[in-house]
Image (cartoon, rainbow, N blue to C red):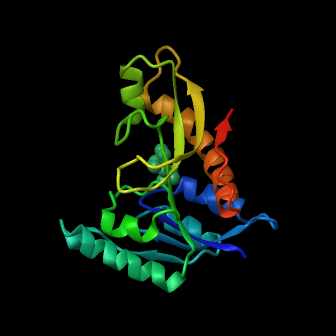
Amino acid sequence: MTRRVAILISGGGSNMVSLVDSMAAVDHPAKPVLVLANDPAAGGLAKAQARGVATAVVEHRPFGKDREAFEAKLLEALDAAQPDMICLAGFMRVLTPFFVEKWAGRMLNIHPSLLPKYKGLNTHARAIEAGDGEAGCSVHEVTAELDGGPILGQARVPILAGDTPEALAARVLPLEHQLYPEVLRRYAAGDRTPVHLP
Ligand code: GRF
């Protein structure tokens, strides 16, 4: 049974593109059924449409601090597409337990750090600041704890002398585009063996 995947984005959606393109493989156990953005200006929406994937927008701004009201609308948009699982891909809104509990065990996220280090924002700057020798990205199951769920894959890069956060991000992002599709392929097939790159 082909798993139906909804992908949530907020911006350019480069990880979404990698996921959608990877699912074009004939033997892939999953297919994209919706790309959902919280911002109508998200550049990823046009990229999804160009790939023939249905899109929807649920703006968070009109709901102000009422996160659960926003998430109720997200759930409505998702219901229309009937996904089996969700991939968060550059989705920049923190989800409350109200939403996470409905999708527990069926929702993944990619985070640009070697979790459990550097949960939250500005991950590359923090790794450089700390004098770490390496950085990278992690794919994990989403739980109510921000960036805290079981890790399903990681990719590592060395931090080079003189690295800026931007330069480091530019080296990590292509690895995100390798890691996330590989984890999704396994996860959709029921395989939770962690992926490690290189
Ligand atoms: C990436 O660094 C990703 O790790 C983080 O958001 C950034 C942009 O992602 N979650 P994308 O290009 O919108 O997929």
The residue depicted at 47 percent of the width and 64 percent of the height is: 8
3 vs 181: above or below = below
Of residues 98 and 87, which is closer to you in this image? 98
173 vs 8: above or below = above
Which residue occupies the extreme bottom position in the image?
Answer: 80
Q: Quadrant of the C terminus?
A: top right
Which residue occupies the extreme right position in the image?
Answer: 26
The residue depicted at 58 percent of the width and 28 percent of the height is: 157
Residue 191, image x, y percentages: 69, 56
Residue 124, image x, y percentages: 42, 31
The residue depicted at 50 percent of the width and 29 percent of the height is: 167
- Would residue 68 be found to the left or right of residue 181 on screen? left
Regarding residue 21, the answer to whether it shows in the image is yes
Residue 98, image x, y percentages: 31, 69
**Splitting the image into 4 quarters, where does residue 48 fall?**
bottom right
**Splitting the image into 4 quarters, where does residue 104 fall?**
bottom left
- Would residue 80 be found to the left or right of residue 191 on screen? left
How many marks overall?
A: 0
Residue 105, image x, y percentages: 51, 62
The residue depicted at 34 percent of the width and 42 percent of the height is: 120
Regarding residue 39, the answer to whether it shows in the image is no
98 vs 169: above or below = below
Which residue occupies the extreme left position in the image?
Answer: 65
Q: Quadrant of the N terminus?
A: bottom right
